[in-house]
Amino acid sequence: MTVELPKGRPPSIRDVARLSGVSHQTVSRVLNNHPSIKASTKARVLQVMEELQYRPNRAARALSRGRSRTIGILSASSDQYGPASSIAAIQNAAREAGYYVNTANLVSGDRASIEEALNHLMLQAVEGIVVIAPQVRVFDVLEQLSIDVPYVTLQSTGRLDDHALSVDQIAGARLATRHLIDLGHRNIYHLAGPQDWIEAEARMRGFLDEMGARDVPTTAPILGDWTADFGYHAGRELLRVRDFTAIFSSNDQMALGLIHAAREAGLDVPGDLSVVGFDDIPEAAHFWPPLTTVRQDFPELGRRCIALLLRSLGGEAEGYPGTIVPELIVRASTAPPSF
């Protein structure tokens, strides 16, 4: 089918209706996934929309229905693997539920930046907000603000837990530490993330809890910055003494740097040193050796997040438990100690 419209004019809902042989009300019902529309009618309307490259005006639809079907994401540190994967998972889950997503990235964690980002989302008439803010200081400000739409946070701080949905970082860190202890390691170091990150604090706590529960002596965790460069330089310094047989790194990138430092020092991983990471980034299976790590189920996190938010918006979906337990993925970077 060839469709022609007057030049310079974008297609309208009435153009779609005329060329589909239906009323504009029927086209509207197709756009809103109304259950009364026959499959054949829906297919015909969608085909015309595709031919016309028709895109509904979201602002106009929001005004006519009093709803925007838009969810906002308030994001900080979206350049890191965890937050970026969370955003992608939420976008996919929202799209499957028939919602648009608008993301506002925080310039900083101060009150002015958060208010500016929230105002941006409110101007888009968002119906709910997902907060992906790994730093504690963002939640300090968020707790003081009054948000007049439902919202869900992807980090548990102990203060906003009625809104929280999260991966159990403590349980994941305990899995990683337990794996090393079960292999026979007793001299285990922890390379932690930045001090103001909620996940870094939780993973450090999980490491210390498991070491304490198994009565294994601990040394003070080393505070890192998530980068492979830091892992490499920290590894070079630590290996000057080499009073440990295993390291649990708070993320995979720092683990990569540690392995690099060990190889450069002439050590074998895992023969001389076992390394465990966290996150299971796509490259983790292709490190040399492939990295034992803790996998977070980001697609499931996205689905649960959207389901929880939709429940808050009016019972459109069932809620889910607020915490997801991660999985330990055992690969070749860990083995029993050689001495």
Image (cartoon, helix red, strand yellow):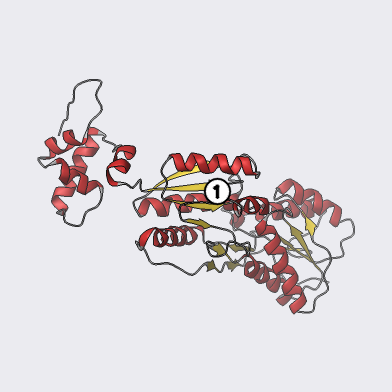
Residue 97 is situated, as x and y percent measured from the top left of the image, at: 35, 55
**Secondary structure beneath label 1:** helix
**Residue at image x 16%, y 56%?**
36
In the picture, measured across the screen, residue 304 lies left or right of residue 167, that is left
Which is nearer the eye, 121 or 169? Answer: 121
**Residue at image x 59%, y 50%?**
81
- The single residue placed furthest to the top in the displayed view is 7
Which is nearer the eye, 261 or 212? Answer: 212
The picture quadrant where one finds residue 219 is bottom right
Q: Is residue 331 above or below residue 28?
A: below
Q: Is residue 324 above or below residue 154?
A: below
Q: Amino acid at mark 1?
A: Ala
Q: Which residue is mark 1?
A: 84
Q: Is residue 76 visible?
A: yes
The picture quadrant where one finds residue 201 is bottom right
For the C terminus, give its image quadrant: bottom right
Looking at the image, how many numbered discs can be counted on the residues? 1
Q: Is residue 250 visible?
A: no
In the picture, measured across the screen, residue 33 lies left or right of residue 238, that is left
In the picture, measured across the screen, residue 120 lies left or right of residue 155, that is left
Rate crowding at label 1 as few (under 14), some (14 to 19) or many (20 or more) other CA atoms within 10 Å.
Answer: some
- The single residue placed furthest to the right in the displayed view is 241
Residue 315 is situated, as x and y percent measured from the top left of the image, at: 36, 63
Residue 236 is situated, as x and y percent measured from the top left of the image, at: 83, 51
For the N terminus, give its image quadrant: top left
Residue 253 is situated, as x and y percent measured from the top left of the image, at: 67, 51
**Residue at image x 16%, y 30%?**
2
